Amino acid sequence: MKTKIIKVKDDNFNILSQAVEILDRGDLVAFPTETVYGLGADGLNPQAVEKIFLAKGRPQDNPLILHISDFRMLEDLSSGDLTKAKILAEKFWPGPMTLVLKKSNLVPDIITGGLDTVALRLPANEIARNLIRKLGRPIAAPSANISGRPSPTDARTTFEDLDGKIPLIIDGGSTRVGLESTVIDLTEDEPVILRPGAITLEMLREIFPSSSIDLSLVSADQVPKSPGQKYKHYAPKAEAYLLKGSLLEKVNKLSDFIKENSDKKIGIMGSSQLLSLFQASQIEAIDLGPWEDLDQVASKIFKGLRDLDRKNVDIIVVEAFSEAGLGLAIMNRLKKSTGNKYL
Ligand code: AMP
Ligand code: MG
């Protein structure tokens, strides 16, 4: 199969009609959202959705998020009390927040991995929303990468993973957030974050103070409630390690590590502060931005891992960040990328 890439220019969304046609006939289209690129299928067509699992090599028991374009779809696809959902939706939709709710009969089993709940998101990206609106049905879309790899934040990376496997990629430039949506379970008495993202625990608690975070996200021996969290995720090709401690400890550990591995090509991803203290020809450095600018850091980590893979480094060392606010989502991804290995 030949994979075509189209670009939306000057907000001319008419070009999306070819994408809608492909989705409508039950094939796949990769498209940008504000979080990462998604691999989309008509969410109400089980044969189309099955193609997502095949193209990505995704385990069948890892449920998919349905992307919607309005509140009407929220009501159609869920059942039960929507009071909390509507409060959160008013505040954070359109945006990087996914709500897990009791599902309605409209939702195919292949979407939910057999669960009686469904995950819904109303994305902010205009291309994504236009696509859903024009199709008139929800679009099922996980990240547009081969399972296990870092999520794509641009069309080029999406093409690298899916070339020859899908008919169309919509190029909408680099994604703004760079990390997948926050997944919030609303089926219990109080909201529970199943996957951290740009809508942080602190932001959620401003609305529902008793909100909590799934224990498996903070302690290694708990089984995750979000089925996808148990799988290998976001892994670069190179062996990767996290670098933690005070800035001084980080500098010392890294210097020793570089000396001990002088025969290796080493990739380092870190804050501008850390990188300004290192200069060596053997190193490929990816500057994630100032230590305190977590929005910028979040938007650069998956791209950084992909860039280092393209440069064929042997080892990747990534600086650890504080776990407050957006830092929790950043560290959640980095721990998985490195398989929780520390220098
Ligand atoms: P991805 O599609 O790779 O961005 O991952 C979607 C995430 O949402 C995975 O971690 C899924 O396990 C989670 N998810 C999707 N549907 C549900 C659901 N019904 N209940 C709990 N988690 C869900
Ligand atoms: Mg994914």
Image (cartoon, rainbow, N blue to C red):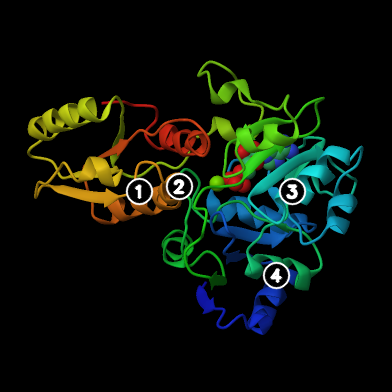
The relative height of residue 212 versus residue 310 in the rendered view (above or below) is above
Q: Which residue, given by chain and number where applicable, does mark 1 sit on?
A: 305
Spatial CA distance of label 4 from label 3 is: 23 Å
Dot 4 or dot 3: first in sequence order is: 3
Q: Which residue, given by chain and number where applicable, does mark 3 sit on?
A: 91
Residue 52 position, x and y percent, is 62, 55
Dot 3 or dot 2: first in sequence order is: 3
Question: What amino acid type is highlighted by mark number 3?
Answer: Lys
Residue at 36% of width from left, 44% of height from top?
A: 236
Question: What amino acid type is highlighted by mark number 2?
Answer: Ala
Question: What amino acid type is highlighted by mark number 1?
Answer: Leu
Depth check, mark 4 against mark 2: the one in front is 2
Spatial CA distance of label 2 from label 1 is: 12 Å
The relative height of residue 262 versus residue 23 in the rendered view (above or below) is above
Q: Which residue, given by chain and number where applicable, does mark 2 sit on?
A: 298
Classify mark 1: helix, strand or loop: helix
> Can you tell which quarter of the image residue 160 is in?
bottom left
> Can you tell which quarter of the image residue 161 is in?
bottom left
Q: Which residue, given by chain and number where applicable, does mark 4 sit on?
A: 131
Relative to 142, is 290 on the left or the right?
left
Spatial CA distance of label 4 from label 2 is: 26 Å
